């Protein structure tokens, strides 16, 4: 990837904002101080110089010789009430790649330049139309793959997270101002707020920051996929299950024991939730060093999973199932949901009786989800999918709750948490107010980097370089 070099300038920029390729229409976006003038040189229709904001007009795009390149719709957005805060025109043309490139070429001949990745959004940020959290929310909306990730991204883009940070920022400013007033009147021994009041305020702020930071694990799972580890003894049907869930032959299926040596994973959308399924090596005693590494990785994946699907071969012996469970149980975390899939019921009429025997082994009080069926059966796979959707829905964030999905945000919140904790310790130890104020200012700094009130060119370049061109 080429380095992101653009600084906000007076250039007028243009780019294709729709996905590349052939389609019904394509949208070419132009933004900058000379937008109306540049587009007017290629536009034959209602004069755009007199068009009011947020109006669409039918006309033709012409080249320098007056030849009609395409019939198009020009939508005009006047600054500062446009996405970028500048004058913007969006040309909706037919989706021929030739037409798209021809129009871009004509625009650049009249003074526009091709935009860099994320430059439209960066201008929106620089012109105060959005803050940095909202800018990253736009990228997440575009990249969202499920209803859950879309909901979180929309909340971020609309300013839900930003509003919470602003509230915390204002409370910290209130606290800092009280401390600084005391410093101004230190010789007169005036106390504008008791230490107990300041500690209480700081603890409220810490609780909010901590709650936001703690939501990152859940947010990352929603964004990247709920990790689901498929485990069990060899030939229990793990690879068959993965293929059935994905709807493709991702994993090799064989009657030979130990076929799967490494973890195989892929993601799929089920019921509006993204799941990341991981097929692992079968659990058994082996002297094969490669297979042993695969089993070790299987153990690690069990420990990291949000959901574990334990595949039990109903045609195998109960002792084999017990041996398998003895490996799995120590790796399960308290928050992990366990689904026991008793497989191969189509060739074993007694499969349902195995549930009672296993229940007695793993403890009746355990919160376990059961599926008895076949990994090859469409109806049984649907039952499993419904079970997974129910688990995901039960652990989803309530409507309106802020959930952090971005690593940068998590790191800033963690740093802010450390700083405000230090301020609380200083207040409790009766440390001088100027030192406490320094901890408060550090907390304010970390919160300000979230919204972009305080930022650096390198940070901005890193963020916007990952946007698509045209956004």
Image (cartoon, helix red, strand yellow):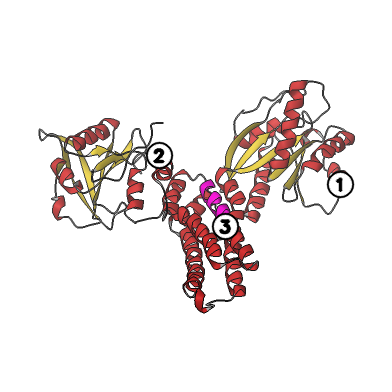
Answer whether residue 409 is magenta in the image.
yes
Q: Position of residue 378 (x, y in %)?
A: 66, 38
Q: Quadrant of the C terminus?
A: top left
Asked if the residue at tag 2 contacts the one at tag 3, i.e. Cβ–Cβ closer than 8 Å, the answer is no
- Name the one closer to the observer, 207 or 238: 207
**Quarter of the rendering occupied by the N terminus:** top left
For label 3, the residue is 419
Q: Which residue is mark 2?
A: 465
**Between discs 2 and 1, the one toward the N terminus:** 1
**Secondary structure, magenta segment, majority class:** helix
Determine whether the residue tagged by mark 3 lies in a helix, strand or loop.
helix
Q: Earlier in the sequence, mark 3 or mark 2?
A: 3
* Residue furthest left in the image: 65
Name the residue rendered at 38%, 31% in the picture: 2
Mark 2 lies on a secondary structure that is loop
Mark 2: few, some, or many residues within 10 Å (few <14, many ≥20)?
many
Q: Are marks 2 and 1 in contact (CB under 8 Å)?
A: no
Q: Residue at x 29, y 31 (%)?
A: 97
| Residue 399 horizontal/vertical position (percent) | 55, 61
> Does the magenta-highlighted stretch encompass residue 55?
no
Q: Which mark is in front, 2 or 1?
A: 2
Magenta residues, as a range?
Answer: 405-419
Q: Which residue is mark 1?
A: 356
């Amino acid at each position: 990837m080429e380095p992101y070099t653009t600084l906000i300038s007076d250039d007028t920029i243009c780019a294709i904002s729709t996905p590349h390729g052939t389609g019904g229409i394509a949208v070419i976006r132009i933004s900058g101080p000379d937008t109306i003038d540049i587009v007017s040189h290629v536009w034959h229709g209602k004069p755009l110089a007199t068009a009011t904001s947020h109006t669409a007009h039918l006309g033709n795009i012409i080249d320098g010789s007056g030849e009609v390149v395409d019939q198009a719709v020009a939508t005009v957005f006047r600054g500062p009430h446009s996405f970028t805060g500048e004058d913007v025109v969006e040309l909706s043309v037919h989706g021929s790649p030739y037409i798209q490139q021809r129009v871009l070429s004509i625009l650049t001949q009249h003074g526009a330049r091709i935009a860099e990745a994320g430059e439209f959004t960066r201008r929106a940020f620089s012109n105060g139309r959005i803050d940095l959290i909202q800018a990253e929310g736009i990228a997440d909306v575009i990249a969202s793959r499920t209803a859950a990730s879309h909901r979180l991204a929309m909340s971020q883009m609309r300013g839900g997270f930003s509003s919470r940070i602003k509230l915390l920022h204002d409370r910290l400013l209130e606290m800092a101002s009280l401390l600084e007033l005391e410093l101004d009147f230190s010789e007169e021994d005036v106390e504008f707020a008791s230490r107990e009041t300041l500690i209480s305020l700081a603890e409220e702020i810490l609780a909010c920051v901590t709650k936001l930071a703690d939501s990152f694990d859940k947010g990352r799972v929603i964004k990247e996929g709920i990790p689901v580890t498929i485990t069990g003894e060899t030939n229990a049907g793990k690879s068959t299950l993965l293929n059935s869930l994905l709807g493709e032959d991702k994993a090799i299926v064989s009657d030979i024991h130990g076929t799967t040596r490494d973890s195989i994973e892929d993601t799929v959308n089920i019921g509006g939730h993204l799941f990341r399924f991981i097929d692992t090596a079968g659990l058994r005693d082996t002297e094969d060093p490669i297979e042993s590494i695969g089993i070790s990785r299987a153990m690690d994946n069990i420990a990291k999973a949000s959901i574990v699907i334990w595949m039990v071969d109903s045609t195998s012996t109960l002792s084999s199932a017990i041996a398998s469970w003895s490996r799995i149980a120590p790796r399960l975390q308290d928050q992990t949901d366990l689904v026991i899939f008793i497989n191969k019921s189509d060739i074993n009429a007694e499969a349902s009786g195995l549930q009672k025997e296993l229940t007695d082994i793993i403890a009746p009080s355990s919160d376990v989800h059961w599926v008895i069926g076949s990994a090859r059966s469409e109806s049984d796979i649907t039952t499993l999918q419904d079970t997974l959707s129910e688990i995901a829905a039960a652990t989803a964030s309530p409507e309106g709750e802020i959930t952090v999905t971005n690593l940068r945000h998590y790191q800033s919140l963690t740093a802010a948490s450390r700083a405000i904790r230090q301020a609380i310790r200083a207040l409790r130890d009766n440390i001088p107010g100027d030192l406490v104020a320094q901890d408060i200012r550090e907390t304010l700094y970390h919160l300000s980097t979230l919204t972009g009130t305080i930022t650096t060119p390198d940070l901005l370049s890193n963020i916007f370089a990952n946007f698509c061109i045209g956004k």
